[in-house]
């Protein structure tokens, strides 16, 4: 199994003769979706690597210094800390002087939105990949659901808390996920990457690298206060790419998202996991959106 501590996009960038500060490539900080470590997106990120200096945390929510709490304030702090350090969680400390492009999928898109509002001096632009804004009556319903612990009976937490988490070996894990319709449509290499980066050895075989209880906690603490972060004008350019068959966007609605991003709203064929279903097409869409946003605001916000 490849060493998860040094994913390929960090390792290859580090091998370059020039330092990040000397490179002309903009810095792109990627933020993964819930339950999928960054390595799962290897094929997707490889398409973007020629254009950007890519940085990412292996997994959000697993550092005890930044626990999962209601509405994710500590997860926002974790993302801010990682941007400021310009490092992977296990890399040596190193500063980045330039604001970054935030590109996030699902959980990652929402964290990127919140952090850009909190610290626009750190961010050039934000691209959200199927991370719909939950506001209005849906946000009120979400708050009530938390009060009465209704999320235990419906929604993704209902399923994640009892998700199978261990297998005899990596191949058994691969076959387990390949048998599921949602994973069977992924390119083989993407699913292989999920097994490589999404599992880890344990005494009886392999187990999920992204802990099941943390995945469930993230679902149970979805922000119901996101409207505090979406007041216009938004401090940096922001865009959204929506899957045409995304159940998450259908449930959350896209009205408030469209109000936030205005003309920077695009559709892509696929469901909520389209960066993993169609990584090459998704990467091209993301790159095009990033270039559009950068062109719309050449100057950086100041602290």
Image: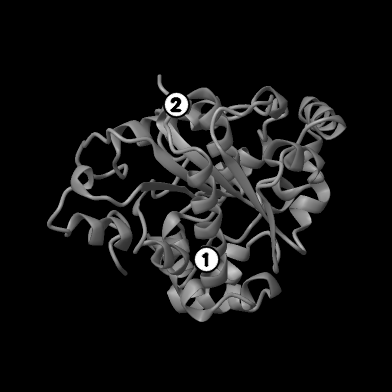
Q: How far apart are marks 1 and 2 (CA)?
A: 27 Å
Is residue 177 something that shows in the picture? yes
Please give the name of the residue rendered at 42% of the width and 31% of the height, measured from the top-left corner.
300
CA neighbours of label 2 inside 10 A, class few (<14), some (14 to 19), many (20+): some
Residue at screen point 60% across, 39% down: 110
In what element is the residue under mark 2? loop
Seen in the picture, residue 180 relative to 150 is either above or below; the reply is: below
Q: State which quarter of the image contains the N terminus.
A: bottom left
Q: Between 148 and 133, which is closer to the camera in this rendering?
A: 133
Quarter-of-image position of residue 261: top right
In this rendering, the answer to whether 251 lies above or below 193 is above
Q: Where is residue 215 in the image (x, y as percent from the top left)?
A: 58, 46
- 91 left or right, relative to 170: left
Percent coordinates x, y for residue 151 in the rendering: 77, 39
Quadrant for the C terminus, please.
top left
Residue drawn at 56 percent across, 38 percent down: 237
- Residue furthest to the left in view is 17
Identify which residue is drawn at 78% across, 57% down: 247
Question: Residue 187 appears in which quarter of the rendering?
Answer: bottom right
How packed is label 1: few (under 14 Cα within 10 Å), some, or many (20 or more)?
some
In screen coordinates, is 29 left or right of 53? right
- Inspect this view and state whether residue 199 appears: no
Q: For numbered disc 1, what is the local secondary structure? A: helix
**Which mark, residue 284?**
1
């Amino acid at each position: 199994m490849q060493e998860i501590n040094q994913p390929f996009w960090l390792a290859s960038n580090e091998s370059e003769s020039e330092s990040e500060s000397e490179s002309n490539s903009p810095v792109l900080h990627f933020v993964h979706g819930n339950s999928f470590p960054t390595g799962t997106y290897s094929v997707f990120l490889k398409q973007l690597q020629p254009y950007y200096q890519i940085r990412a945390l292996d997994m959000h929510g697993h550092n005890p210094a930044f626990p999962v709490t209601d509405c994710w304030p500590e997860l926002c702090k974790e993302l801010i800390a990682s941007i400021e350090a310009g490092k992977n969680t296990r890399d040596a400390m190193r500063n980045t002087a330039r604001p970054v492009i935030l590109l996030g999928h699902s959980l990652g898109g929402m964290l990127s939105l919140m952090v850009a509002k909190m610290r626009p001096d750190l961010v050039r632009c934000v691209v959200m990949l199927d991370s719909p804004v939950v506001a209005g009556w849906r946000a009120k319903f979400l708050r009530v659901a938390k009060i009465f612990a209704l999320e235990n009976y419906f929604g993704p937490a209902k399923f994640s808390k009892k998700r199978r988490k261990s297998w005899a070996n990596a191949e058994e894990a691969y076959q387990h996920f390949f048998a599921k319709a949602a994973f069977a449509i992924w390119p083989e290499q993407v699913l292989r990457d999920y097994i490589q980066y999404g599992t880890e050895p344990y005494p009886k075989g392999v187990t999920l690298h992204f802990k099941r209880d943390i995945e469930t906690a993230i679902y149970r603490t979805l922000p119901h206060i996101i409207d505090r972060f979406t007041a216009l004008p938004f401090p940096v350019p922001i865009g959204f790419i929506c899957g045409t068959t995304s159940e998450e966007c259908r449930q959350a609605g896209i009205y408030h998202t469209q109000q936030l991003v205005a003309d920077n709203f695009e559709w892509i064929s696929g469901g909520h996991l389209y960066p993993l279903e169609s990584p090459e097409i998704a990467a091209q869409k993301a790159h095009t959106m990033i270039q559009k946003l950068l062109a719309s605001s050449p100057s950086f916000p100041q602290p």
